[in-house]
Image: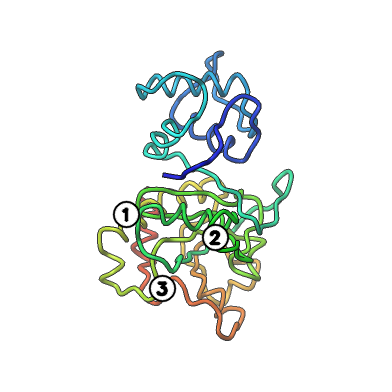
């Protein structure tokens, strides 16, 4: 569970409010006029009403405020918390339309809360300084955390940053085929697939692997690994994640079936 995030309440305006409004809409929680919420990242009376509706449905205290307990229950229901990365290009309004989804590995253990820990690191809220890098999403076996808006530019894959969404996965590029099919890895891939299926639908990104020769061109639409960007642009000593044994075809099948 993410610790010490601020409450979402009346007069709050953050990217996480937008995620909360999308979540409430997905859960079928309507405003006091029986309408879906407008996703405007501003927590007003309509969002508070829909929040109370959700809390009542989940047997929580109906306050209209997203406290730690409400957030914890919502994460179990699929809510994506948001911790803004320190180093990213943020646009108002969002200007980019991504065409690529780039797969990364975090290079840390497949543990619950790995997503939260890396997100806090990207946000400059960990013990070590924030890196000169970021990703749109961090995924572990029990949660997803967003660090950069979909239409903002994360610093995750160099030349394709301006036309891609970066998804970090708990685990290591050195994992074997067997490692990728163990229980934690499969939980991570399943959770990631649900996320990227939604992104593909939202931005009309095809669920296919991009040809290596297309990555450096405007033809690139679909999925690739960070390693493929390294290869396409001839970066010596570049990133090789998510590793040679990442099960791309299996993963794309999960995306298609999500």
In the rendered image, which quarter is residue 57 located in?
A: top left
Q: Which part of the image, by quadrant, shows the N terminus?
A: top left
Q: Is residue 246 left or right of residue 136?
A: left
Pointer 1 and pointer 2: residues touching (CB < 8 Å)?
A: no
Q: At numbered mark 3, what does the secondary structure look like: helix, strand or loop?
A: loop
Q: Which is more toward the observer, 76 or 68?
A: 68
Pointer 3 and pointer 1: residues touching (CB < 8 Å)?
A: no
Residue 172 screen position, x and y as percent:
39, 70
Q: Is residue 221 left or right of residue 141?
A: right
Identify which residue is drawn at 45% across, 26% down: 28
Identify which residue is drawn at 37% across, 39% down: 76
Q: Which is more toward the observer, 145 or 246?
A: 145
Q: CA distance from mark 3 to mark 1?
A: 17 Å
Q: Nearer the viewer, mark 2 or mark 3?
A: 3
Against 60, residue 221 (above or below) is below
What is the residue that sits farthest to the right in this orientation? Answer: 92
Against 235, residue 180 (above or below) is above
Mark 3 = which residue?
173
Mark 2 = which residue?
166
- Earlier sequence position, callout 1 versus callout 2: 2
Number of residues whose C-alpha sits closer than 10 Å to that of mark 3, classed few (under 14), some (14–19) or many (20 or more): many
- Earlier sequence position, callout 3 versus callout 1: 3
How does the figure colour the protein chain or chains? Answer: rainbow
Q: CA distance from mark 1 to mark 2?
A: 19 Å
Residue 10 screen position, x and y as percent:
61, 24
Q: At numbered mark 2, what does the secondary structure look like: helix, strand or loop?
A: strand
Number of residues whose C-alpha sits closer than 10 Å to that of mark 2, classed few (under 14), some (14–19) or many (20 or more): many
Residue 120 screen position, x and y as percent:
53, 54
Mark 1 = which residue?
187
Residue 185 screen position, x and y as percent:
32, 61
Against 180, residue 202 (above or below) is above
């Amino acid at each position: 569970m993410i610790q010490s995030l601020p409450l979402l309440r009346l007069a709050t305006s953050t990217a996480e409010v937008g995620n909360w409004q999308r979540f409430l809409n997905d859960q079928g929680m309507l405003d006091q006029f029986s309408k879906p919420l407008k996703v405007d990242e501003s927590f007003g009376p309509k969002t508070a009403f829909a929040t109370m509706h959700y809390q009542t449905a989940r047997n929580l205290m109906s306050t209209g405020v997203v406290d730690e307990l409400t957030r914890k229950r919502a994460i179990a229901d699929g809510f994506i918390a948001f911790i803004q990365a320190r180093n990213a290009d943020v646009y108002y309004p969002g200007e980019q339309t991504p065409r690529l989804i780039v797969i990364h590995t975090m290079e840390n253990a497949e543990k619950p809360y790995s997503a939260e820990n890396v997100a806090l690191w990207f946000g400059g809220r960990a013990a070590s300084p924030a890196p000169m890098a970021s990703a749109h999403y961090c995924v572990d076996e029990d949660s997803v955390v967003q660090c950069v808006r979909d239409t903002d530019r994360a610093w995750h894959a160099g030349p394709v940053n301006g036309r891609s969404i970066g998804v970090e996965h708990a685990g290591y590029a050195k994992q074997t085929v067997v490692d990728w099919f163990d229980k934690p890895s499969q939980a991570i891939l399943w959770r990631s697939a649900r996320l990227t299926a939604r992104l593909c639908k939202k931005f009309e990104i095809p669920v296919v692997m991009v040809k290596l020769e297309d990555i450096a061109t405007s033809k690139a639409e679909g999925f690739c690994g960070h390693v493929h960007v390294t290869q396409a642009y001839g970066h010596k000593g570049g990133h090789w994640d998510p590793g040679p044994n990442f099960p791309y075809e299996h993963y794309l099948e999960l995306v298609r079936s999500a």
